[in-house]
Image: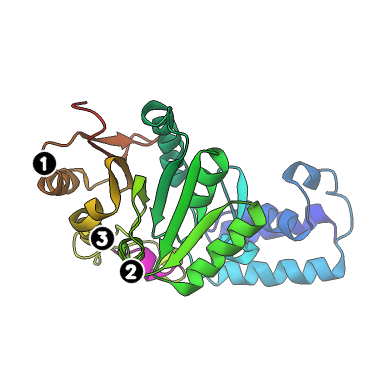
């Protein structure tokens, strides 16, 4: 069987089962260790038997409900390939926008700093912390997670990508408090899906629930952070969060309760959805 025949056959099967047809190409060029553009140059080649077996095995896992990112063991984030598995949340494109907006604000508010202390709480795969450490050389980056298994993935990613990030295991801010750390920039993408909200089976059945669900209204971990975050930030600090697109009113209420008279803004993503929260703690008088 040629590559073209295998891809077409697999795409047709995926289409029949209402699955993403692109998975066939993505899985094949991953297993063949080729770039996407190289796939088209080998369409008329015979498929190696071992590659064929590996491809069919991967397709079965996908059809059985496993995310393609876990099958590949990789997901691209901020133009870098991060190792992912069932112990970490799969990095999303929306979170790339959070990283991008943090970098803009580093230029705006910390341009004259020689070194900037930044923490990422609930780091998961380390995608945010590692990307920021690699993009901005002035940053000293610390990352925490309650999951030992998640931290093993994050440490591997930091090592593979050459990022200097210090990792601590513990519940939310506790490792930072225990080590008497203070930060100029506090970043977190905590779990924010309400407990009873319906989500796609492929997400619910595969990704770690500890990284998905955030209490009855989705803001449990934000309130927990807001209540004690002043213990780990400098007198002037930027706080940056990803949030659920439908949580604006609840988030405004929570921010104004824990940070009265503090400037903040909720920023829309590329799709026009409320997705990022920035709190400017003593950084500026008003928006």
Looking at the rendered image, the disc whose residue lies closer to the viewer, 2 or 3, is: 2
Inspect this view and state whether residue 85 appears: no
Q: Nearer the viewer, residue 132 or 249?
A: 132
Picture coordinates of residue 18 (x, y %)? 52, 58
**Which residue is depicted at the point 19% across and 27% down?**
285
Q: Which residue is mark 1?
A: 260
Q: Is 207 situated above or below 236?
A: below
Q: Nearer the viewer, residue 144 or 9?
A: 144
Q: Quadrant of residue 279?
A: top left
- Residue under the point 63% across and 71% down: 60
Q: Secondary structure at mark 2?
A: loop
Q: Earlier in the sequence, mark 2 or mark 1?
A: 2
Q: Which mark is residue 171?
A: 2
Looking at the rendering, the stretch of residues picked out in magenta corresponds to: 207-213
Q: Is residue 179 left or right of residue 81?
A: left
Q: Is residue 90 above or below residue 243?
A: below
């Amino acid at each position: 069987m040629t590559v073209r025949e295998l891809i077409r056959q697999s795409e047709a099967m995926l289409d029949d089962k209402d699955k993403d047809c692109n998975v066939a190409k993505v899985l094949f060029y991953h297993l063949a260790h080729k770039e996407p553009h190289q796939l088209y140059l080998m369409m008329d080649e015979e498929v190696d038997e071992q590659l064929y077996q590996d491809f069919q095995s991967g397709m079965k896992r996908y059809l059985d409900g496993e995310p393609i990112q876990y099958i590949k063991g990789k997901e691209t984030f901020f133009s870098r390939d991060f190792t992912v598995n069932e112990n970490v949340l799969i990095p999303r494109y929306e979170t790339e926008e959070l990283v991008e907006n943090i970098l803009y604000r580093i230029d705006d508010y910390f341009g004259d700093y020689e070194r900037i202390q930044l923490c990422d709480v609930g780091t998961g795969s380390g995608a945010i912390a590692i990307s920021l450490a690699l993009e901005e050389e002035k940053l000293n980056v610390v990352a925490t997670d309650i999951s030992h298994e998640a931290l093993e993935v994050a440490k591997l990613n930091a090592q593979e990508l050459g990022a200097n990030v210090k990792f601590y295991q513990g519940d939310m801010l506790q490792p930072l408090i225990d080590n008497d750390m203070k930060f100029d920039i506090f970043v977190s993408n905590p779990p924010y899906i309400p407990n009873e909200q319906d989500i796609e089976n492929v997400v619910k059945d595969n990704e770690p629930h500890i990284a998905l669900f955030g209490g009855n209204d989705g803001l449990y971990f934000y309130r927990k952070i807001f209540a004690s975050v002043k213990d780990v930030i400098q007198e002037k600090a930027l706080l940056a969060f990803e949030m659920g697109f439908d949580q604006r009113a609840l988030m405004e209420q929570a921010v104004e309760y824990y940070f009265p008279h503090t400037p903040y803004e909720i920023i829309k993503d590329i799709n026009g959805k409320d997705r990022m929260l920035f709190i400017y703690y003593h950084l500026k008088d008003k928006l």
